[in-house]
Image (tube, helix red, strand yellow):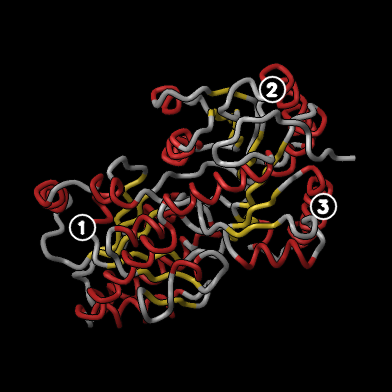
Amino acid sequence: MASSSRPKIWIIGSGRLHLRIPLMQRLTADGFDVAAVGPDKGEELDEAGFSYHRFPLRRALDPVGDWHARDILEGLMRQHRPDLVHSVNTKPSILVPSAAARANIPACVRTITGMGALFSSSSPKALAMRWLYRRLQRRAAPACHTTVFQNPDDQEYFKDHGLVVESTDELVLSSGIDVEPYIASAGSPATRAALKDDLGLDEKPVITMVSRLIRPKGISEFLEAASLVRARNPQVTFLLVGPEVEEGPTAFPAERVHRCPDVRFLGRRSDVPTLLAISDLFVLPTYLREGVPRVLLEAGALGLPLVTTDVPGCREVVRHGENGVLVPERDGQALASTIFDLLADPARRKRMGQASRELVTERFHLDIVSAAYARIYRNALGIGESENRNITPMRRAA
């Protein structure tokens, strides 16, 4: 039974849960008692006033550690008795439904935030791991009241392979972006001008990519395109922003970035919104199977034309020829050609930037996403918007 009229919701992820604070705040205002569970320290969540529980979880494949994490999650659930658990990211979408069923939690929702590097590679290992991924997701499905997808390609894949129970799937485009505060976080015109001065950019065209240094994000293609463009126009500045990744099969060697004379690598930055605001074009040549890349929403909200690959998730944000251009994946020359064309047409870039802001606001605003999840939670718990009723278990895994 719910302890109060405010159902207890746990959002469980594999990291970076602070990015979900705006969503959690919206859900709190909508009548839910929201907490988070993840492997990070969670200082930002504590500062925002949310309860936070930690459990051990590694990004890399770790069968023994992963099932130990499942058991710890089960123990936390038995101790604190949330009414609904909501998993995000790949590993939690597999582990949380099992833990919730074992702990007799009334409702479980999982969000498929993309399908990751396994579906970005055709190596024998990746192909073998896809079989395991399908098997585990298929086993998790019956314990979920709802499986949420962030793009229709992933939704179709799950349905085609029997990884979701019929009529329990929903499409909610992206994790949402709080557009107005994000624009404000880019700072005043004076702040932006000061950053341009600090970086010595003057009035040079600025092409920016924001990403961790991993191969499936298209780092190699970005470096290639930068060299091709600057060979013809050395006034163009290419900025690469994001943290280095030291280990793992998808890590891109940082020394290759440092050795590239045509790209300025700024590393991890806290002023990404301002860096985007002083850019003329945003580029993301990814071939990673993400739900919807958040950085495309951020760049779009700030009115940038977008150049990205024609892959699931990205094609939800970019309407080819309207607010940006979709290019073939793993094709640095096509990327360079597109950048050339857009640099030569400032009026077109301006129209595309305006269209980006409009599209992000209309399709991906946090208000839309939070309303969708509030509805999904209420449906899973069997309660109306203003109802206060007992909450009893709805589905358990075999």
Q: Nearer the viewer, mark 3 or mark 2?
A: 2
Q: Secondary structure at mark 3?
A: helix
Q: Secondary structure at mark 1?
A: loop
The residue labelled by disc 3 is 138
Point out residue 161 in the picture as x, y percentages from the top left corner: 80, 64
Q: Nearer the viewer, mark 3 or mark 1?
A: 3
Marks 3 and 1, how far apart at CA: 45 Å
Q: Which corner quadrant of the image does residue 344 belong to?
A: bottom left
The residue labelled by disc 1 is 278
> Foreground: 16 or 182?
182
Q: Residue at x 40, y 51 (%)?
A: 177
Q: Residue furthest top?
A: 79
| Circle 3 crowding by C-alpha within 10 Å: few under 14, some 14–19, many from 20 | some
Quadrant of the frame with the C terminus: top right
The residue labelled by disc 2 is 81
Marks 1 and 2, how far apart at CA: 47 Å
